Amino acid sequence: MPVSERTDQFLHSKLPIDKDEKVLEVYRHHWFAYASNWIIGIFLVVVIMALAAGLTMIGSDGSGLAQYRTAIISAGAVFSAFVLLGTFIPVYLRSQEQLVLTEEALVQMLQPSLFASKVDHLNLLRIDDVSVRQDFIGTVLGYGHITIETPGEQDNYEFLMLPKPHDAARSITQARENYEAAMQAGRMHTTLGEAPAAPAIDPQQYQQFLQYQQMVAAQQGQQPQQPQAAAQPDQTAEQNNPPQPQ
């Protein structure tokens, strides 16, 4: 889907992408990902209220559970409210999940819980393959599950119930090829796989280090040379007084 200027600014402020990095596509879940939760929640509410109404019909002559009709209906309504709340939470969490494709990376935004979020950043050069899975309902409604395969032991990326999954897979593959071609042509640069840069050296500290080395060298040059080890006394005396002939 086209990325508006407001969405682009929001993504650049929230995601680990460069300010000059262009956002190509933003993918969200298919509408059926939300509707399926609401269908289940509403179905449970209908069952609960029908059960509550059925219980109040027992002993309609005033005996049995009929005399507790108001309490049973109220309890069913409260329980139904909790069911709807429990349905809203996963729908909200799923609505916060996105798959963002830029010209250099693929960023997945997940919302595991109300108080925790997860952002996965994958360089496009790390993508080995993109596969799509569709079941019968997904084929009919036009959604599928997309898997981003990565090399080595790195975990694969999965995004479930994506609308038009084949178009998304094609766009991701094309973005990877364009990024690789741009790098080979020298139009873009990446630090992927490069050794970390050497730390910068402070010129003032370097000059102080040189002066310290010169001072140490000068001190070593002024020290008198150590005399060689003296010969053994017996050998010296023998050399100075050779034995007299008999």
Image (spheres, helix red, strand yellow):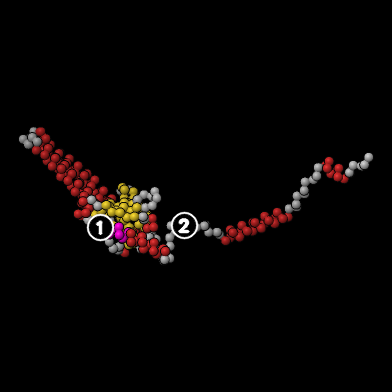
Helix or strand or loop: what does disc 2 sit on?
loop
In the rendered image, the residue lying farthest to the top is 63
Q: Residue at x 64, y 58 (%)?
A: 211
Where's residue 193, x and y in %? 45, 56
Where's residue 219, x and y in %? 70, 54
Q: Which residue is drawn at 52% across and 57% down?
A: 198
Marker disc for residue 196: none
Q: Residues within 10 Å of mark 2 (few under 14, many from 20)?
A: few
Q: In which quarter of the image is residue 186?
A: bottom left
Question: Looking at the image, is 238 positioned above or below residue 123?
Answer: above
| Residue marked by disc 2 | 194
| Residue marked by disc 1 | 164
Where's residue 129, x and y in %? 34, 55
Q: Quadrant of residue 25?
A: bottom left
Look at the image and tell me whether residue 135 can be seen.
yes
**Residues drawn in magenta:** 167-172
Compare marks 2 and 1 and give the one earlier in the sequence. 1
